[in-house]
Amino acid sequence: MSYNIYAALELGTTRTVLAVAECETGKKLTVTSLASIPSVGVRKSQITDIEQAKQSIRGVIGEIERKAKKEGGSIDIANAFLVVNGQHVSADQLSSTIAVNNKTVSDEDIENVVANAHQLTPGGGERVGLDIIEQDFCVDQRGGILSPKNIAGHVLKLNVLSISADKNRIEDARTAADAAHLELRDPLFACTCAAEAVLQDHEKKNGVLVLDLGGGSTGYAVYSDGYLVATGAIGVGGDHITNDLAQAFQLSNARAEMLKREHASAVVSSLDEDDRITIDPSTPGMDSRSVPCRAVNIVTNARVKEIIAMIREKLEEQDLINRLHSGIVITGGGAKLKEIDLLLQREIGTTVRIGKPLYIDGLDQEEFPAEFAAIAGALLYAHKNYEERSLFDTLKGIFR
């Protein structure tokens, strides 16, 4: 029996996640081990302390190893695909053009223009390519062609969306991982990974926005006519809500995070007028205190509306708002915020759903599977592109 096994690492602002998935050849991919711990040494999706980031990576590796041992097995992870977040990720519209050999476009012409497109890299040596998304073809001046084979013309052009990241950010992650004895493979953008895990084909065709709500940043990806048309990230996320609550109510970040997770809502309601939230003291012996529920929600609402406004501006720049016929799908830890789907529906004017990973098993036991959509998408990418690789390409050894 042949198995393919893959690992993916997400070194985020709020948490560090490591997941291992495997599948029998021809079967559905299944997450067999998952570890998530609070991140240290990372702020606003940027490594600020290599040594601390190394400890975060060692921490999730150790957690995976402990889980395997508890189940009577052993696992030693050698390498993992890297899930990348942050405002430094951007997308550029590029095109590859070749002359058609004969009077009509041949398979060879298509192969050549695609090969040329995948060599395109924006930003010179300062950027690292994460993905090249093929969009549509043009033959002479006729655009919007999805399959150009046998179409008459002299010049064939392929439009692509090139997703890239800051080279130094990727190198910092590799340095931290190397110090933790983990080799990093392809870097992948968290939001497009999440989209591949949660979207159905008809949503991509009809037009849909994916929002991956992280701690230090919010990623967005828009699909229309079956392919990715825009993607990127803004440097505001769930941690900014936590910081706002900490400042507004003079709380530690840990207390503010608990307040956000357990009580805060993205929507301000008149029903909250008289309600108060009791906050236990952070220092033993001190009295507990209470804060108005409405005030908490006003602070939360203001920051979430800012995030939505920034995303809306990005979409309006490219005239994409009116193409979201399948609505909005939200993923990431920020999707757990109470009534964030309702606020998005009000502000953007379309339907909203939580994005649960669809094409991978093993996450149903998690309290909030949408939180792991990006890591699930990275594992699906690995499976799709490296299915023929040996088990030992990803793991030095796994014994069950």
Image (spheres, rainbow, N blue to C red):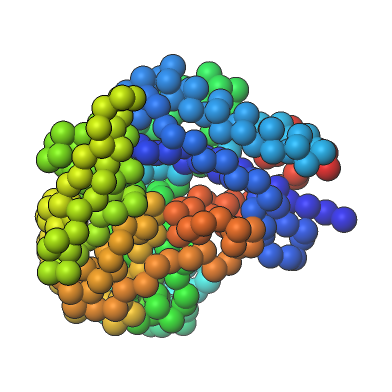
Residue 253: image quadrant is: top left
In-image side of 322 versus 102 (left or right):
left
- Depth check: give the residue in front, 313 or 73: 73
In-image side of 85 versus 68 (left or right):
left
The N terminus is located in which quarter? bottom right
Q: Establish if 144 lies above or below 25.
A: below
- Depth check: give the residue in front, 219 or 288: 288
Residue 344: image quadrant is: bottom left
Residue that lies at the very extreme toward the right in this rendered image: 1
The C terminus is located in which quarter? top right
- Residue 118 placement (x, y as % from top left): 43, 52
Going 34% across and 50% down the picture, which residue do you hit? 261
In-image side of 36 versus 141 (left or right):
right
Going 30% across and 29% down the picture, which residue do you hit? 282
- Residue 70 placement (x, y as % from top left): 75, 37
Going 76% across and 34% down the picture, which residue do you hit? 69
Residue 41: image quadrant is: top left
In-image side of 70 versus 166 (left or right):
right
Count of residue discs: 0
Going 82% across and 38% down the picture, which residue do you hit? 72
Asked if residue 144 shows in the view, the reply is: no
- Residue 36 placement (x, y as % from top left): 52, 40
- Depth check: give the residue in front, 29 or 155: 29
Q: Establish if 104 lies above or below 76.
A: below
Q: Establish if 351 lies above or below 317.
A: below
- Residue 251 placement (x, y as % from top left): 21, 34
Asked if residue 55 shows in the view, the reply is: yes
